[in-house]
Amino acid sequence: MTPATGPWDLLAPGAAEIAMLAACRVGGLVLVAPMFASRTVPMPVRTALLLVLTLVLLPAAQASALPGAHLTPAAFLAESLIGFSIGLGAALLVGAAELAADLSSQAIGLSGAAVMDPLGGHQTSALGQFFGLLAATLLLASDGHHVMLEAVARSFARVPVGAEPNVGEALRVLVRQGAVLFSLGLRFAAPVIAAALVTNVGLGVLSRAVPQLNLMNLAFPVQIFVGLGALVVSLPFLGLATRGWGDQVRTMAGAVMNALLRGS
């Protein structure tokens, strides 16, 4: 079977198979990227976005497709994993920001104020909602959606449609990449947790030194004030994380694509 070579050559032999596999790769991105996968985006809009992006990226898929692209479950899974790994970079950054905010809320005593997260459709702390929206806004402001679409377009040359994938190795690499969420979340929340710990120790020492003081009414507002102050001071670190986010997406997607090609 000869792959299609012209732009949007939908009538060439194998064009339908290439288009369906390319749609799986784009669908993996739309499924997980925060700006595309938000529950506030209606399903018809996401479906239309998937079709439009597939048509836009189809020439890149056709230009590098290998002869004999078959619609096998392994091929569908491999294509979805590539798009998933590209969108996972953005999802991990937003998730790490929300995790850091939840950890900070628990440290300073604001974990009881739960609100509905419009991006994820689940309950989170007020700080978690703020940090999640802030991270998503920073990604859009830094052209994160363009970075991901460019990565998908370049991935067709790196892993052509029709390549024999090593899905098991790619899944193992993708699971290991998920550990980045917890490390980033802890690093973002570390200043607030440290400030809350120092405040608690200081209040404990003060209550021992001056037992006459009624610190029960004072401890809670002081802890919140110090924690929010540390949170404001640490906000620039979130902006710094978005600067190198594009390299993280390329590294993560490259690791998954290398794993897919390993042993093929």
Image (cartoon, rainbow, N blue to C red):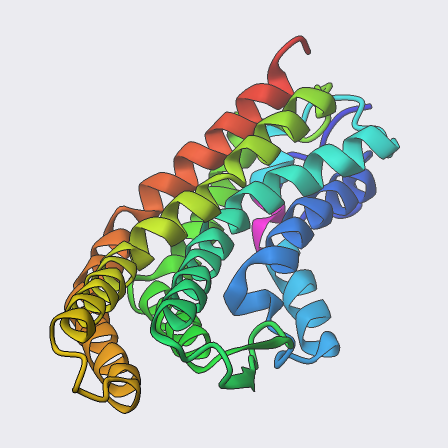
- Between 125 and 134, the residue placed more toward the observer is 125
For the C terminus, which image quadrant? top right
Whether residue 187 is situated above or below residue 119 in the rendered picture: above
Whether residue 184 is situated above or below residue 189 in the rendered picture: above
- Between 258 and 12, the residue placed more toward the observer is 258
State the residue at coordinates (51%, 82%). 112
For the N terminus, which image quadrant? top right
- Judge whether residue 58 is colored magenta: yes
- In x, y percent, where is residue 204? 23, 68
- Between 144 and 235, the residue placed more toward the observer is 235
- Between 53 and 151, the residue placed more toward the observer is 151
Q: As drawn, is 150 to the left or to the right of 190?
A: right
- In x, y percent, where is residue 256? 56, 29
Magenta segment, prevailing SS (helix, strand or loop):
helix
State the residue at coordinates (30%, 84%). 220
Whether residue 10 is situated above or below residue 146 in the rendered picture: above
Residue farthest to the top, as pictured: 263
Q: Quadrant of residue 46?
A: bottom right
State the residue at coordinates (37%, 40%). 248
- In x, y percent, where is residue 77? 76, 36
Q: Quadrant of residue 197?
A: bottom left
Residue farthest to the right, as pictured: 72
- In x, y percent, where is residue 185? 40, 53
Q: Which residues are magenta?
A: 55-59
- Judge whether residue 97 is colored magenta: no
Q: Quadrant of residue 108?
A: bottom left
Residue 7 visible here: no
